[in-house]
Amino acid sequence: MKLKKYLGVAAGFHDAAVSLVDSAGRILFAGHSERYSRVKSDANISAGLIQELNGHDIDVIAYYERPWLKQLRRWYSGEGVQWNQLSARRILEQQLRPHCDLPARSTPVKSYSHHLCHAAAGFQTSPFDRATVVVIDAIGEWDTTTIWGAEYRDGRAHYRKLWSQHYPHSIGLFYSAVTARLGLRPMDEEYITMGMAALSSPPNMTYLMKQYLVNNENEITFQENLHTGLPADWLGPFSSASFSDEMIAAGAQKLAENLIYNVMCRARDLGWSENLVYGGGVALNCVANRSLGDYFDRIWIMPCPGDAGNSLGSAALAMGGPLDWRDPYLGHNIPGAYPTNQLLDHLLSDRVVGVASGRAEFGPRALGNRSLLADPRGLDMQQRMNQLKQRQSFRPFAPAILAELADEYFVMPPRWSQSPYMQTVAQCRAPELYPAIVHVDGTSRVQTVNQDSGSGLRELLEKWYVWTGCPMLLNTSLNIRGEPMVNNIQDAQRFEQLYDINVCS
């Protein structure tokens, strides 16, 4: 019997992506539009992305939100209604038709709520049959935080919304607004805000921020549209020049953590399951994630929990059952064996090398197939890499380490013995030995690499360990700040020529 194929689409706001799954639960492809258009956080589907689907007959197209509900909320918030975006089919015609003949009149089109897509992307890739699902992001149609009870019955995923918080109350929008206040790109550079937070102490900032932003029900209120600029007094006392950027970031991070933990307490107390599935863009805050084990016994965060991941969530909902999740290497393929020995030679001589090999990672973090790798030892490496990537000097880099040795080098948080997708931070036991991968607060965003990781990075780490006695490598994305990650062989060659770094494929 022919397997049906389900195309999930997330597009129109930021971080456009598509995913393709079949009725056997296999994930055939998942990729980001920006890596083809080379436009950071591209909101629209690009031609190169659609070309990856050549040869596939699409039976159902699924869209990652309910457009008419989103337009109703836009009308409510005074942003104006986009009359040409009231239906999923109309939006898909605008996004796909310039590049292919989809959606055909006969192709079924389904749309699902934004937060349900987040929930499905997490639960239907998770190892759990039953889980409490928490979604925290900037905004869906109206929802900004939701808690779901998820389970499989008769082979199909079922979701029950247990609790929700609605616009204009939003942890994610608050954090993005602070990111904009710091002169960074909202909906993109929140991770810099998170890193900056470690440079200052937050107590007074946290108190003032609570007074200004939090009402009697501990809910946050403000406007959604961060891209058109914010009023000078929007953040109240935090607009004052008397507060440094570092103090603002520290206060925002501390408050966000407190609000996230309140949500997690509520989710646990609802008693649905001790398995946690966590999704939405806020799930990328790895500093906050280190405390999730205080509330749940087992944790799953899909490596693309933001809006791009909703392309997979919508396809999963249309398909209905569990997805056969194996690894995050789901994007564009650069064929050929992983260049382990070539990489090792460059690391031993130059200490820095790029790799573009195999299928690209689905998600915002490089996990070995589109990475810049370096020796984490030595006082010069952090500065050297930040200069190369044109980043702020304070920003640290992540270590990729042999999974079985992680506990010897890092104090992993409760319930986080493994962190294959860089989703939590851990205290480094010997920061003086590995300064390039340790932040000013002594923590590192750890990637544990298992035998079955799906990437040749594991074999490289094993050989590197034999040669050097060091079981880890500095791992960062193969890009320069403000650019998308390298995707194909042409991108890799361009990177090598522009930045004088060897890139092995």
Image (tube, grey):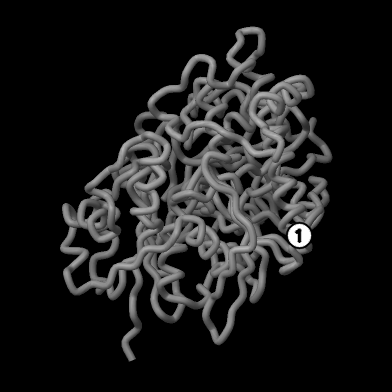
Q: Residue at x 24, y 46 (%)?
A: 83
Q: For numbered disc 1, what is the local secondary structure?
A: helix
Residue 446: x and y in percent read: 68, 46
- Farthest residue, direction top: 242
The crowd level at tag 1 (other Cα within 10 Å; few <14, some 14-19, many 20+) is some
Q: Quadrant of residue 217?
A: top right
Q: Toward the viewer: 443 or 145?
A: 145
Pointer 1: what residue? Answer: 268
Q: Is residue 74 in sight in this rendering?
A: yes
Q: Residue at x 76, y 43 (%)?
A: 426
Q: Amino acid at mark 1?
A: Arg
Left or right, 399 with reference to 497:
right
Residue 337 vertical placement versus 281 (above, below): below
Q: Quadrant of residue 127?
A: bottom right
Left or right, 272 with reference to 319:
right
Q: Toward the viewer: 436 or 326?
A: 326
Residue 92: x and y in percent read: 26, 57
Which quarter shows the N terminus? Answer: bottom left
Q: Is residue 379 in sight in this rendering?
A: no
Residue 121 vertical placement versus 496 (above, below): below
Q: Residue at x 73, y 35 (%)?
A: 434
Residue 54: x and y in percent read: 24, 65
